[in-house]
Amino acid sequence: MRPEMILHITRKEILSTLRDRRAIISNLLIPFLILPLVMLGLPVFLGGLFERESQTISEIAVVSLVNLPADLRQQLEAQNLAFSEVTDPFSVVESGDYQAAIAIEAGFAEALESGGKATLTLYSKRGNLRSELIASKVENAVRDYQQTIVAERLKAAGLDVAVLTPIELSAVDASSAAERASGSFGWLIPFFIVIWTLAGGQMTAIDATAGEKERGTLEVLLVSPVRRIEAVMGKFLATMLFGLTAALMAILGYVLGGTVMRRFFGAQLGDEGSEIVTLLGGSLSIDLISILLLIISSLLLAALIAALLIGITMFARSFREAQTYVAPLSFILIIPIVGLQFADFFSFSSLIYLIPILNTMLLMDEIVKGSIPLVPLLLTWGSSLGFAAIFLDFAYRSFKREDVLFRT
Amino acid sequence: MIEVSNLSKAFGKVKAADKLNFSVQAGEIFGLLGPNGAGKTTTLRILATLLKADAGSATVNGFDINKESEQVRTSIGVVNGGMGLYDRLSGSEVLYYFGKLYGMKRQAIEKRILELDELLKLGDTLTRRCGSFSSGMKQKIVIARALLHDPSIIFFDEATSGLDVMARRAVLDFVKNYPSEDRAVIYSTHVMGEVEELCDRAAIIYQGKIIAQDSTRALLGKAQASNLEQAFFTIVESSGLVPAVEASA
Ligand SMILES: Nc1ncnc2c1ncn2[C@@H]1O[C@H](COP(=O)(O)OP(=O)(O)O)[C@@H](O)[C@H]1O
Ligand SMILES: [Mg+2]
């Protein structure tokens, strides 16, 4: 392998990708914009919807308005509810004529007055956001009403409301400062790298391999004195570079979205967005060595994904075939990430650090939480490198296979 | 400059090259003539070290195709009809890219591009992106790229397919003038007229076998034909192999 040949090929693939407007959009723009849009757009949009719904007056169906005590009625109206009398509360909600309905049994008010129990039935559609929102207005009103009744009854018995809460449970977060500040950072970064290396690298990978076959340029390349391993490595490096760029753009977008969120929505937040911001603001005490280890782990993970992409696309004979293989990848690679959500419930043997992707997430999580576990570190890096090498070797073999290179 | 002995290659049951023997001398244009599927491209790909032969051996410019494939590739330039360029690079960017792959220095490439511009009249193909080329413009850059490292031997494989009359004429004239004492051309085509016009010697290849090999004039004489097309059919019939037209009829 001659490094200058590899870099020469990498440079050409970079130039070629940079001149493709679609690639720029999907490699740089989309990863940068998508998270801020989702982070900002969704709460603003949904928040607006909820707010409108809770402020407008919604009409609910009622069976036997006459049974409704005046106090409760006031509470319900305070929640912006209005009533219309029906006979079959179930079917009017089921059919969608009303979002919610209540049925008040006869003697409701009398039962409560005499210190007894009464039943109010609430009809709504589970899973229908609008219906549930309106039902929650009813629940709020009933809860408030109930509290006043309880308070009255206790008073009548000569008791204070405080008797209901004899124990006060006080919760303290015992995670270390590093752990608290790290939040989900440890697995979020590898997650971004996996998803966006895949998304950002695939255009370059397909273009440089199956695309070259399809356009009849591969034969030209192979007839030059360049060695096939150099061509594979050159294309691999370009893929990795664009993948990492996309991942970096996504992380930047995430930080930006988090900053904006924090500034405008401040206290209500406390989610990862603000955690990353605090992290970058320096509240996380990781030293230079840890940062270096994180960077190396990230690079190796990106290398693994890029090698996988090159292996697959080099094997494919056409653009379409390559896309067909690549499309389900992001779904498959997400599986270990989902598994990680339950990591706290298990104790693993060190062998788990041989599982690609998952290992990097676990490792990075530990590093940001302040420890440098040597064995997991070596296993993880070895695994990433090993798998990358296997995929590159596969790409190289495909690149030498006559039936893959030339088909008639 | 090229010695081929008993070269064979099969794809499954299809014998694409069947015990081929021929040689190409310096200074000559050697024709490989045969209908589609005869095995011309396969033969050239083996000589260009893109495919491995099942059996037999060959040397190109004195280098063994199996053991010295890198030197072989440095010695040859390949032009074929189906070759592509990089749509998003300009003609000169393509030439720089390949020049470097051939180990040339930047100045050497610049100098060579000037020479090739003179020779092939590259014009604005150098500055425009290849994606916008006509087939004639494309073929100019394909040829320029094959000549970039000043190879001793050039392979032309159906190099005029898809070209208009003018572009085709330009290619033929170029090939005709290319050989010198230390250079040779293999010209592979199914077009009899091109072989007749260009080639000093030719091999007629059919179903992977060379069924006749001689100077172009001798081939005509042997078949007592006035043009190569007639000669071709006479030779195929006398070879005992069934001509494709009859086989499909
Ligand atoms: N990569 C390949 N896989 C399978 N069969 C092939 C391959 N390349 C060529 N062939 C077969 O070998 C024979 C010779 O093909 P080719 O060398 O392309 O002929 P020509 O160039 O003379 O038209 C044909 O029958 C073709 O179908
Ligand atoms: Mg052919």
Image: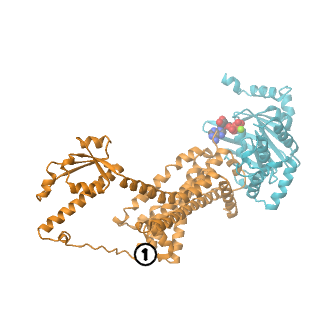
Chain colours: A orange, B cyan
Q: Position of residue A95 (x, y in %)?
A: 31, 40
Of A279 and A108, the residue lying toward us: A108
Q: Where is residue A65 in the image (x, y as percent from the top left)?
A: 21, 47
Of A283 and B185, the residue lying toward us: A283
| Residue at figure coordinates x 20%, y 63% from the top left | A148
Label 1 near ligand 1 (CB < 8 Å): no
User: On the rendered image, what quadrant is the N terminus of chain A found in?
Assistant: bottom right
Left or right: where B154 falls relative to A303: right
Q: Can residue B242 be seen in this view?
A: no
Name the quarter showing ligand 1: top right
User: Mark 1 belongs to which subunit?
Assistant: A
How many numbered marks are there? Answer: 1
Left or right: where A83 falls relative to B118: left
Instruction: Indicate whether A297 appears above or below B56.
Output: below
Q: Which amino acid does label 1 sit on?
A: Ala
Q: Position of residue A170 (x, y in %)?
A: 28, 74
User: On the rendered image, what quadrant is the C terminus of chain A found in?
Assistant: top right
Q: Mark 1 points at which residue?
A: A178
Q: Where is residue A25 in the image (x, y as percent from the top left)?
A: 60, 54
Instruction: Indicate whether B47 appears above or below A366.
Output: above
* Mark 1 secondary-structure assignment: helix
Left or right: where A76 falls relative to A159: right
| Residue at figure coordinates x 69%, y 41% from the top left | B42
Dividing the picture into quarters, in which one does residue B4 lie? top right
| Residue at figure coordinates x 41%, y 64% from the top left | A352
| Residue at figure coordinates x 67%, y 24% from the top left | B247
Instruction: Indicate whether A258 appears above or below B178.
Output: below
